[in-house]
Amino acid sequence: MTTEPETTDEAEPGQPGAGAGEVEPGQPGAGAGEVEPGQPGAGAVDGVPETEGTPGSGVAGDAESSAEGTPGSEAAGAAEGSADAAEPSEAEAGPAARGDSATPSESNAEAAAEPESVDQDEAAKPESVDQDDAAKPTEAKTAAAAEPESATQNDAAEPESVDQGDAAKPTEAEAELAAQRVERERIERRKAEKQAPVEAGAKLSGTAADLLAAVRAVESGAKPVASAFSEPPVPRRPAPEPERRPEPVAAPAGPAVPAAGAVAGVRAVLTEGGAPDTLAPQLAALLGDGADQRLREDPWQLLRVSGVRPEQADGFARALLGAECGPDDERRGRAVTVWLLEQAALAGHTALEVAALTTALAQRAVPDPDTAVQSALAEGEVLVFQDALDTAAPAPEAEGDEEGAEPPVRVLIGLERYALAEESLADALGRVMNSVPKEDGSAADWERTAASAGRSAAELIRAVAGHGLVLHTGGDASRAEAAALLSAARGLGLRTWAAAHSRIGCDRFTARLAPSDGPQREPGTGVSTVAGLLSGTEGPGRDADGALVLDLLVVLDAPQLDVETAAMLAESLPDGARLVLSGDPGVLWSAGPGRVFADLLAARVCPGIASRTPDPGPIGELISGIGVGELNQVEAPGKEVVIVPVRDAGEAVHRTVQLVADSVPRALGVPAEQTQVITPGHGGAAGTRALNAALKERLNPGPGRFGGFDPGDRIAYSPAPGRTLPGRVVKADADGLHLEISGAPVVVPKERVEQSVRHGWALTAHQAVGSRWPAAVVVLPGDAAQALTRPWVYTAFGLAERHLSVVHGVEQALPRAVAEVTAKPRTTRLPVLLRPQVPAAG
């Protein structure tokens, strides 16, 4: 491969990037990005020194939180990545994470206290913007201040400098969350009604009644019971259809706003303990009646606020309790136990093994971890599970072994929220798999339809004809097979629907549908986002039983389903409906806890159809190699793949701005608004904040009249944790910030802007997953090389349709990550829970 170095006056090697300062001596990333001897040197995209073919080096900033393969959670066992790893998380979106809160503590202290047995890498944990003028307690109380921590579920957006009120007005996000709460309450009511007798000696089923029995057994000091349920199917119960609403939205009320007196009482206790009084509304709502008294009696209740860390709660407790406070306090042990499980959920785990939990408690200075766990169980704050280990072949019985010895089990501790979701998901999937599909044509009709389709599409159609649940794997090109399935099913008289993770994904899938399934399609067919389908703002509507009015649901981007979302989807299906989960197993997992798609693939409880349709072109060839751990050189005659070597983060920012604003539009005809920049993290010298600042200065300069935004700015709007919607700013007025999202108007109230909107020229890979753009510029500066994993690279490179530029400064860290660094495992219970649902598949 030949190299043709080209330079311009605007971009000389070593020149610091636009909008970014020089790299300080010793700063991570300085000097990175040299081209190895024999490595392709530089091609050209209109004046930028580049290399066509295969990337070989660089990563940026504070690694994009756990959701993108980056260490960082308190329960994760690894120090958070690079410069801003200890910043407060964006998705927490509360006063604890920003505003008047005390500044976050350093990540070094975090790394020392975290166990290695719990993985953080998949939790979505974006960060908030530092505010130097935030109100801080006096020096005597600084240790006690409740400083926020980065501990959230994903890359929720969070720009700078917008004041927040103590109690935010109801918003569109709260409307969606309220609709989801309705569904969760219905799930919990169903669980509570299951009162079939427990058969002693069988495997723990994990239902609510069984969990209660386990807790009672622990209270009495006995071994947790193991039992099984044998119960008839519970009839579907009517559920109110979620309210439909247009955007912009005057959202229905969210959680009840605490009374002013209650907030004032909690504020007084917080002030007395040296904690930020901005936490008062949250705590008053969380603790309910008598919140101030409850907080005074148990100061570690402060840990219930997202973003507060144990050492901050300890300081608060010392200020209130004085000599009564100590590390062996039973209240502290319970609170830290729950907090660690919440951190594990942010890292993607739905439960933790007892050994991992007790190790983490010991590292959090809990003197007797076992007692702390027992106390939390006795109070019903956590639940215990015994899951039989899946042994491929039973070991031969040793001489003298007792007959009927119990099989080995794995003891897990988890939070009720995720236990109910995982068990509800298993129950609902079992119902889908075992119910008789709706009569919708003869086998001959299905076969004729399949015979007229392509090879992989035909296999998918045949599988759906005879099964209620089908898994479909493949890259972006495989979506054509899902589209063929929907068209075929509609032709057979089924009411069909598809749901994607993002609005961009919906629009791209709609374009693949046959003309009769497009804008003029009949009622009962369509495409929506998963969030819109669940909230009721999109979709076919619900019947009197609360079930979706459809016969076939195809869920695209299935790897992005966490256990709670998947449970609500499966519970919403009517009896006899078919469910197809389709997606690329190589991309990043969900921001929330669980790995639903991967667990189902591993469990082999239903048919799985692997697409044989490869993604086309040099980008498709590159991505296919990455999926199997190989970073191959590819021929790119049309400059589909271009490598831009850089030596430091400053040069990376400069080259990125030049590519987006000048080189790619001029050489390839892709305008700047259709080019997306992707980087591993928000912080650091080449994270999303630095890149967005430089890109705004070049593409849409302005004073930032409303919270740092101006009309025309590209933004990323996060109405709820785990969702990022690209759009642009239209205007700002007394109602808030007016956005345009996929052609629809959205108004974000002023007090919500800081926590839910950030500039969007540059995104993290987890924010962008589920979408694609005509051109993508992936920035890999050297200061976050440790953040790179194969799923991250696979996801980021796969976001480009026509052109991929890699601003490359990580040298050999990139091929090493592709070859060796796979996704870290998550502890989940779904495979075990699925076994009794489909005994024939065992």
Image (spheres, rainbow, N blue to C red):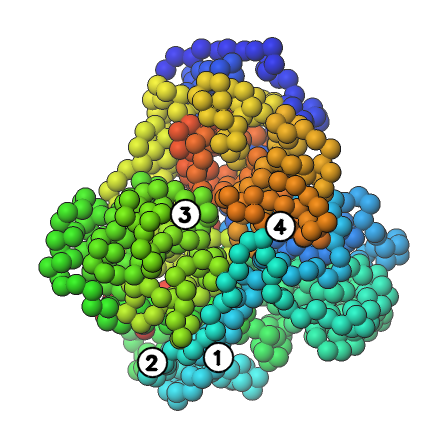
Residue under pointer 2: 233
Residue under pointer 4: 747
Q: Do the residues labelled 3 and 1 touch (CB within 8 Å)?
A: no
Q: Which of 299 and 752 is in front in this view?
A: 752
Please state if 168 lies on the left or on the right of 272 as rendered: left
The residue located at (86%, 58%) in the rendering is 141
Amino acid type indicated by mark 2? Pro
Distance from the alpha carbon under mark 1 to that under mark 2: 14 Å
Q: Do the residues labelled 4 and 2 touch (CB within 8 Å)?
A: no
Residue under pointer 1: 189
The residue located at (61%, 35%) in the rendering is 712
Distance from the alpha carbon under mark 2 to that under mark 3: 35 Å
Among numbered discs 4 and 2, the one appearing first in the sequence: 2
Among numbered discs 3 and 1, the one appearing first in the sequence: 1
Which residue ends up furthest to the bottom in the rendered image? 197
Against 497, is 376 above or below?
Answer: below
Disc number lying in front (1 or 4): 4
Disc number lying in front (2 or 3): 3
